[in-house]
Amino acid sequence: MSNKITVAAIQLKPAPTVAVNLTNAEALLIEAADAGAQLAVLPENFAHYGQSDFLQVGHDESEPIGPARQFLADQARRHGLWLVGGTIPVAGPNPKPFARSLLFDPEGNCVDHYDKIHLFDVEVSAESEQKKRYCESDNFSAGKRVTAVSTSIGKLGLSVCYDLRFAELYGQLAALDAQVIAVPSAFTAATGKDHWQVLLRARAIENQLFMIGANLVDRNHATRGLWGGSVIIDPWGTVLASVEGDCSGVAVAEIDLALIHKLQLKMPVRDHRRLPF
């Protein structure tokens, strides 16, 4: 296994239909693959953002295999990518679906998944804007399992959006020897402007690992602005690549996993921890 891999963060602007979202995602995955990406991360809810009936979508994506799940399998296989499929609603034993992040290998097999643990139940507002209430738990069940997956390109940790505010999750992923953590997101414009990249850099620095933040974008939407700013960050907190502005795009960077070991030798933060997570 080489220490150097090329990774991509996909940034999408939500479209009115699933079909258009998938078409737009495919174009950017082609761009990422053409740039040599071995791992690509799509944003949270990349196919179904704005849908009103997530329970029905969750059933559609569960049995036998829904349109977004099939799309992800096909794209991973077609481009020979490890693919983190943002999130899609997936029905389970609970009355509400999970916001599930699926990991596909380059043969198109779903090898593992992560169900979003921290649900976005908050009130936010930006300057000169009215307060807006988000209650993700109205539509989704919370997951419970911390997920780090051994792959042919390294140990990959999975997380989603609002998880970023809970440092203990990333500490647990680091304890599981994650080297790269994917953060598919639909971070709001109101909070993203001040917090998105700061939180990603903090999680990278304190855990000495790489972060890939793939965000939806639509900054000027009247009711549900999305920040974008998709980015790849190294263990020193350096931004290696990013997507700027209110547009779709791809951030691509080569990352060297050997940097993690070099930093840990000089600054063994994990050995110095004195408090439990």
Image (cartoon, rainbow, N blue to C red):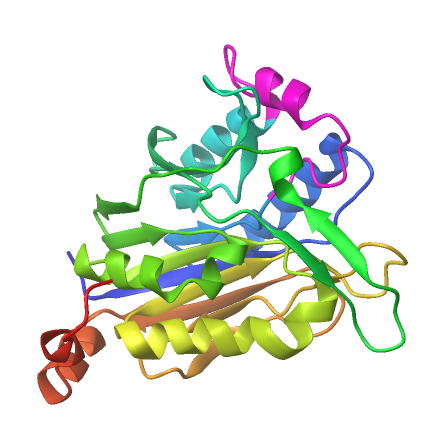
Quarter occupied by residue 249? bottom right
Quarter occupied by residue 180? bottom left
Magenta stretch, main secondary structure class:
loop
166 displayed left or right of 274: right
Is-magenta flag for residue 150?
no
Q: Position of residue 229 (x, y in %)?
A: 62, 70
Any part of residue 168 in sight: yes
- Residue at the limit of the structure toward the top, as seen here: 64
Q: Quadrant of the C terminus?
A: bottom left
Q: Position of residue 232 (x, y in %)?
A: 46, 70
Q: At x 73% / y 31%, what residue is drawn?
A: 19
Q: Position of residue 69 (x, y in %)?
A: 52, 27
Quarter occupied by residue 137? top right
- Residue at the limit of the structure toward the front, as seen here: 275
Please name whichever residue, 74 or 16, is drawn nearer the observer in this view of the structure. Answer: 16
118 displayed left or right of 18: left
Is-magenta flag for residue 66?
yes
Write the start and end of the magenta stretch as one range: 45-67
Asked if residue 46 is positioned above or below residue 109 in the image, the reply reads below
Any part of residue 35 in sight: no
Please name whichever residue, 164 or 101, is drawn nearer the observer in this view of the structure. Answer: 164
Q: At x 75% / y 47%, what residue is drawn?
A: 14
Q: Position of residue 7 (x, y in %)?
A: 40, 61
Asked if residue 64 is positioned above or below residue 121 in the image, the reply reads above
145 displayed left or right of 98: left
Asked if residue 185 is positioned above or below residue 235 in the image, the reply reads above
Q: Quadrant of the N terminus?
A: bottom left
Please name whichever residue, 136 or 215, is drawn nearer the observer in this view of the structure. Answer: 136
Q: At x 59% / y 23%, what residue is drawn?
A: 58
Q: So how many labels did they put on this image?
A: 0
119 displayed left or right of 151: right
Q: At x 23% / y 46%, what residue is drawn?
A: 151
